[in-house]
Image (cartoon, coloured by chain):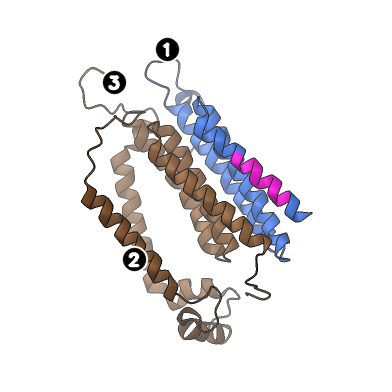
Chain colours: A brown, B blue
Amino acid sequence: MTEGYSYEVSPILLVDLSLLTMLLVVALAMLRSRHLFAVVMLSGIYSLLSAAFFVSLDAVDVAFTEAAVGAGVSTVLMLAGMLLTARREKPFESRRVPIARLAVFATGAALLYATIDMPAFGDPNAPANAYVGQAYIEETPGDISVPNIVTAVLASYRGFDTLGEVIVVFTAGLAVILLLGVGSARGGREVSDVDGEGS
Amino acid sequence: MFAAATVAIIAAMVLALVRAFAGPSLYDRVLAGNSFGTKTVLLIGLMGFLTGRPDFLDIAILYALINFAATIAILRFFSYRQPKGAPAEPRRASTGGGGE
């Protein structure tokens, strides 16, 4: 999987750096923008960027989910939510608590410090690659004749877990449909809190 | 040569980002998001060639499909909900396209 992985400055590393820089810029722009439609489109772009970053980390299935759910489904869901409210975020008086900012920066610094202990990317002796992962790689061709190990793990070894996840996602989808009122998006029903006046 | 193409794609991504930040109208932003998705597809294909594993090309094609479907979904959404200030026009949902 990670054949020929090198630690020197490779073109892929530069691509990763520029992708991460763009991720940061998009996140800051989403924070600053008060135009909600722009924020929704920027969050779609954010998902596409992180999907590209996941592909470059060899996590292709995660990247695919991110592109389908993040850039596709959740953009449409957020648009549906936005159309039920205002198009612009209300200006708010900035009343910042210094302790909150301090807590955020302290937590961030602690997390950054914790990354020092993490094993190197693609390290064969890392716990993620050593015990269970190794067993899956060895056992899957004999246990289940599915060539893709990720599919075998998700659909067979952890089949009940995946079934539970599907139920959770189905329930969440039903709740979102009920909240958004899909009929209003189809032009069937007006949603308004005020009588006689469209919001 | 792949590296030069990658640099060009990333420059184009930055330009699309600028349009998504600045774009005054709604359609500028939709277009920026769509073209950014196209750039992502190209970048994933190029990354496959940069690492010598062109297997990523299949994934890039699937991304193109998702990107297309997402843009259609966003635009259809706006065709259903006209802005409140707009003059009343027959909704397209009742005349056509309400197939699903």
Q: Nearer the viewer, residue B74 or A97?
A: A97
- Report the magenta residues as a range: B5-14
Have a look at marks 1 and 2 and say if they share a chain: no
Three-letter amino acid code of the residue under disc 1: Pro
Circle 1 chain: B
Q: Amino acid at mark 3?
A: Gly
Q: What x and y, as percent, mark residue A161?
A: 37, 71
Q: Chain of mark 2?
A: A
- Find residue A91 and report its image quarter: top left
Q: Could you say which is closer to the camera, residue A62 or residue B91? A: A62
Residue A30 placement, left or right of B2: left
Q: Is residue B37 above or below residue B99?
A: below
Position in image of residue B55 (x %, y %): 69, 64
Question: Label 2, on which residue?
Answer: A110
Residue A96 sits above or below residue A132 on the image = above
Question: Residue at label 3?
Answer: A198
- Residue type at numbered disc 2: Ala
Q: Secondary structure at mark 3?
A: loop
Question: Left or right: B49 with respect to A127?
Answer: right
Q: Quadrant of the N terminus of chain B?
A: bottom right
Whether residue A48 appears in magenta in the rendering, the answer is no
- Residue B59 image offset from top left, x and y in percent: 63, 58
Point out which mark residue B87 bears: 1
* Total labels drawn: 3
| Distance (Cα) linking label 3 and label 1 | 14 Å
